[in-house]
Image: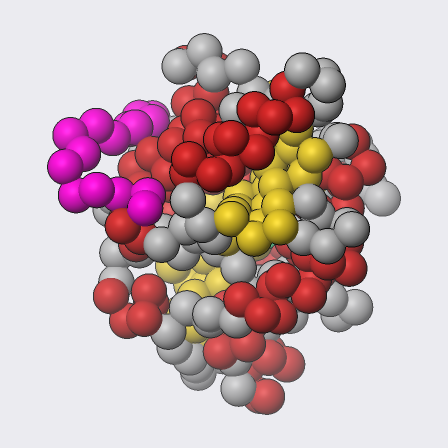
Amino acid sequence: MSVQVIDTIDELQARVASTRFLEKVVGLVPTMGALHAGHVGLIDRAVDDCDLVIVSLFINPTQFNQQDDFDRYPRIIEDDLAVCEKCGVDILFAPATEEMYTGQECTTVDVTNLTDHLCGPERPGHFRGVATVVVKLLNISRADRAYFGEKDAQQLAVIKRAVEDLNIPTEIVPVPTVREDDGLACSSRNQHLTVEDRKNATMLYRALVAAKDAIAMGEQNTEVVTRIACEYFKNQPRTRVEYFEIVDPSDMQPLKVIQGPVCVATAVWIGQTRLIDNILCCPDKRD
Ligand code: AMP
């Protein structure tokens, strides 16, 4: 069966409502399009788990804090549709900005504390934009399950928190990060990298693995782990480390001492492109 493309909220809600009496499990995969293997990981999981799978494609202007980042975000809906066809998606929900925002809104979703570190300070308003649009998409679709990538660990934590705090009856399903063969996490932004920058971009994963190894070997001091990992960013002329932090995965607060599972997260500019990545680590566990 081919994918149904829907661009209005009313039509999506009518379509979902028509399946309700059949007790179908509805799954939502929110995306901004330019679908790649990382998105496919989420979609495949949703197709396996659910009876009706909706992929949303909405480049949400309110989560961009730089206009040129929004302007140059890849827009390739025909390719995205082909990916959805191949994966067995039922509905591609691709609303225009005016459909999602009338311009009269007075309500936003602010998740505090979890947004104080990592990407929060450098991207003011970003998580407000993300949390607000995700809550809107969950309410519009009434999905039973929604799928999010561990690649965006802070985003995942923010969404889990918002859903819990606001009693939204959707199960949030985390999906592991999909990587290229050399370890670089798949991202729509990778296509902005020059050939040389693309080669160098593996430094993020190599630094994260170095941190993971140090932690597995028993290093508990986050400063020491950070120093070891950040060696990988040294003498890289086109590289600027925005942050490299070791946080508690439940509340995204920085740690000084590692005593349990931690999330090691980094944001690095390579040339004009900002990449983020993270890795979950447990002391005494090396895989
Ligand atoms: P985006 O289109 O970048 O907003 O991403 C949509 C969803 O795909 C988010 O839940 C991301 O965390 C997830 N995602 C993006 N890249 C990856 C990846 N490499 N592995 C797993 N999930 C990803």
Q: Position of residue 196 (x, y in %)?
A: 58, 88
In the displayed structure, 131 sits above or below 200; it is above
Residue farthest to the right, as pictured: 287
User: Which of the 4 image quadrants contains residue 134?
Assistant: top left
In the displayed structure, 197 sits above or below 29; it is below
Residue 16 vs residue 134, the one in the foreground: 16
Q: Is residue 79 visible?
A: yes
Residue drawn at x 31%, y 52% is 97
Q: Is residue 127 magenta?
A: no
Residue drawn at x 53%, y 59% is 33
Q: Position of residue 111 (x, y in %)?
A: 33, 27
Answer left or right for 211 relative to 142.
right
The mark total stands at 0
In the displayed structure, 116 sits above or below 103; it is above
In the displayed structure, 230 sits above or below 145; it is below
Residue 98 vs residue 18, the one in the foreground: 18
Answer left or right for 167 relative to 261.
left
User: Which of the 4 image quadrants contains residue 137?
Assistant: top left
Residue drawn at x 47%, y 45% is 245
Q: Position of residue 188 (x, y in %)?
A: 54, 66
Q: Pick the quarter of the image with the C terminus.
A: top right
Q: Is residue 258 visible?
A: no
Magenta stretch, main secondary structure class: loop
Residue farthest to the bottom, as pictured: 195
Answer left or right for 263 relative to 274.
right
In the rendered structure, which segment of residues is drawn in magenta?
99-113
Residue 231 vs residue 105, the one in the foreground: 105
Residue drawn at x 68%, y 65% is 82
Q: Position of residue 88 (x, y in %)?
A: 77, 50
* Colour scheme shown: secondary structure
